[in-house]
Image (tube, helix red, strand yellow):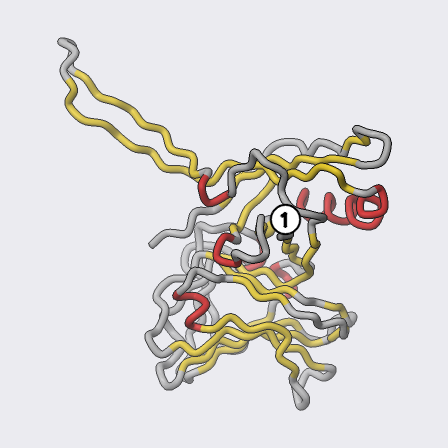
């Protein structure tokens, strides 16, 4: 068992659109910047829709994740992350793929062993025949994964079991119960690890700290349970890792997460 942190290596301004993608009520860049108040909604007359990034300095990506997907066509086949060494995509390579069955089972992320840098990257949404003009996606992550060392030491509450809920009981002046209000918020959890080697900290911490300080990311506490991945962001300051015994570090990162709506 190991955890994964999936980080985005792009910004919304990197995105180009080819099928009149539009985003009602907000920035057209929201699919990359983590604002969940609008949607990335392609408007295509075809059974496919393509968006992507062209002619960039080649970069290695091995991670593709989405959150807040709505209005899924019944004949959706998959959502693919594709790489190529030319903007014509004459030799496309599928880097990662999220299938319809994955989405139905709550799996909204895919990783691969890709170690090739591509200068042209696309997201392709495909159906068997329905035009792509209804599906909406709140957030997209195209980037890299950081493998957390070892498993999670007990006690630990997985993110999807840590929904933050406030319950307000309503009573009359005489003390009679007249109902209650339930206010559901985001997930509220901590990413933590003990017994982390100094080599892992030296190799990963500063780059990881920079990414999660600036952007939302996706976190999976147990790589055997891909359905447990949550789109999240840091809450408050990120404490520095501590060298708390003679051989190892420990760290903890307070986070809030985005609850997927039914």
Q: Is residue 239 above or below residue 139?
A: above
* Front residue of 16 and 226: 226
Q: Secondary structure at mark 1?
A: loop
Count of picture labels: 1
For the C terminus, the quadrant is bottom left
Residue 166 sits in quarter = top left
Q: Residue at x 42, y 72 (%)?
A: 100
Residue furthest top as drawn = 174
Instruction: Please determine whether, in this image, residue 97 is positioned above or below residue 223.
Output: below
Q: Nearer the viewer, residue 193 or 109?
A: 193
Identify the residue shown where x is 29% and y is 33%. 182
| Residue 23: % across, % down | 45, 62
Looking at the image, which is closer to me, 182 or 51?
A: 182
Judging by the rendered image, the residue that carries numbered circle 1 is 215
Residue 105: quarter of image: bottom left
Q: Give the residue at x 45% y 71%.
A: 42
Task: Residue 114 in the image: state x and y as whole percent.
Answer: 71, 72
- Mark 1 surroundings: few (<14), some (14-19) or many (≥20) residues within 10 A: some
Q: Position of residue 91 (x, y in %)?
A: 68, 88
233 on left or right of 57:
left
Say which quarter of the image contains residue 128: bottom left
**Residue appearing at x 55%, y 37% in the figure:** 156
Q: Nearer the viewer, residue 189 or 70?
A: 189
Q: Is residue 196 left or right of residue 40?
A: right
Q: Position of residue 110 (x, y in %)?
A: 57, 66
Tell me if 27 is positioned left or right of 247 in this view: left
- From what the image shows, is residue 171 above or below residue 72? above
């Amino acid at each position: 068992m190991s955890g994964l942190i999936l980080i985005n290596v792009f910004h919304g301004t990197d995105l180009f659109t080819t099928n009149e993608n539009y985003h009602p009520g907000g920035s057209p860049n929201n699919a990359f910047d983590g604002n969940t108040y609008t949607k990335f909604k392609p408007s295509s007359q075809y059974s496919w829709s393509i968006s992507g990034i062209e002619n960039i300095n080649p970069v290695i990506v091995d991670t593709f994740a989405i959150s807040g997907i709505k209005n899924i066509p019944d004949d959706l086949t998959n959502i693919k992350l594709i790489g190529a060494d030319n903007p014509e995509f004459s030799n496309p390579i599928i880097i990662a793929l999220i299938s319809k069955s994955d989405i139905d089972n709550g799996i909204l992320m895919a990783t691969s062993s890709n170690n090739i840098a591509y200068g042209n990257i696309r997201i392709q949404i495909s159906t068997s025949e329905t035009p792509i003009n209804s599906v909406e996606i709140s957030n997209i992550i195209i980037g890299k994964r950081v493998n957390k060392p070892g498993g999670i030491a007990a006690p630990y509450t997985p993110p999807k079991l840590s929904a933050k809920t406030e319950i307000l009981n309503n009573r009359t002046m005489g003390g009679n119960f007249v109902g209650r209000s339930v206010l559901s918020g985001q997930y509220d959890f901590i990413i933590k690890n003990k017994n982390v080697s100094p080599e892992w900290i030296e190799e990963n911490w500063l780059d990881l700290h920079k990414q999660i300080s600036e952007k939302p990311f996706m976190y999976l506490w147990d790589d055997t349970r891909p359905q447990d991945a949550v789109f999240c962001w840091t809450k408050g300051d990120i404490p520095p890792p501590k060298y708390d015994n003679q051989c190892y570090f420990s760290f903890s990162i307070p986070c809030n997460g985005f609850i997927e709506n039914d």
